[in-house]
Amino acid sequence: MTKGDSQSTLKFDKRFLLLDNALKTHRYQKDSLLEVLHTAQESYGFLDKDIMAYVARALKLPASHVFGVATFYNFFKLKKPGAHVVTFCLGTACYVKGSEDILKKVETEFNVKRGESTADGKLSVFTTRCIGACAMAPNAIIDENVEGKATSESIIKKIKEVKEG
């Protein structure tokens, strides 16, 4: 990669320096892949093909292995998320208590599908298997804040509040 590569997500800025520093800190060890991917996600907000290819080359791993790890874990996002992120827990307790129905109502209200962002880039909706807060089921996470005992009304209201800022 060169500084003149304008098509690349990886820019020679603070984010790239953080990623590069993580690689150096872990001495380019193959077994540091998860830690490096976490740093990349924290820095860029998502992992696109350029980021994963760079990490693969730096750790001397096949790109398919890096992609496989990134897609295995729910935490990693492969697309740039919206300004606000809502993640619905679909674990057993949340599912039984109606999280799927709440999710469907949010998809309809905001015209967005799970795993995608709204056309204006203001909202992304994701799902996860379990957040470990089963006693508060159903749960949704809105911009890293857990909303327990959620209802479609409470979640839609909260999303509207955070979108309006």
Image (cartoon, grey):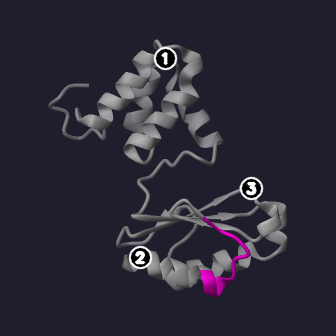
Where does residue 71 sit, x and y in percent of width and height? 60, 42
Q: Position of residue 64 (x, y in %)?
A: 55, 29
The CA distance from mark 3 to mark 1 is 30 Å
Q: Amino acid at mark 1?
A: His
Label 1 to label 2: alpha-carbon separation = 38 Å
User: For residue 127, what is the image quadrant?
Assistant: bottom right
Q: Which mark is residue 163?
A: 2
The quadrant of the picture occupied by the N terminus is top left
Residue at 63% x, 87% y is 153
Disc number for residue 26: 1
Q: What amino acid is labelled 2 in the image? A: Lys
Dot 2 falls on a residue whose secondary structure is helix
Give the Cα separation between the discs numbered 3 and 2. Answer: 25 Å
- Residue 31 placement, left or right of 82: right
Crowding at dot 3, Cα within 10 Å, few <14 / some 14-19 / many 20+, comes out as: some
For the residue pair 20 and 136, the one nearer the viewer reads as 136
Regarding residue 66, the answer to whether it shows in the image is yes
Mark number, residue 130: 3
Q: Of callouts 1 and 2, which one flags the residue occurring earlier in the amino acid sequence?
A: 1
Q: Is residue 44 left or right of residue 12?
A: right
Whole-percent x and y of residue 113? 55, 70
Q: Secondary structure at mark 1?
A: loop
Q: Give the residue displayed 78% in from the left and 69% down from the top.
A: 137
- Can I make out residue 111 in this image? no
Find the magenta span and give its range. Answer: 146-154
Residue 91 has which mark? none
Of mark 3 and mark 2, the one earlier in the sequence is 3
For image coordinates 51% across by 74% down, the residue present is 112
- Residue 151 is a magenta residue: yes
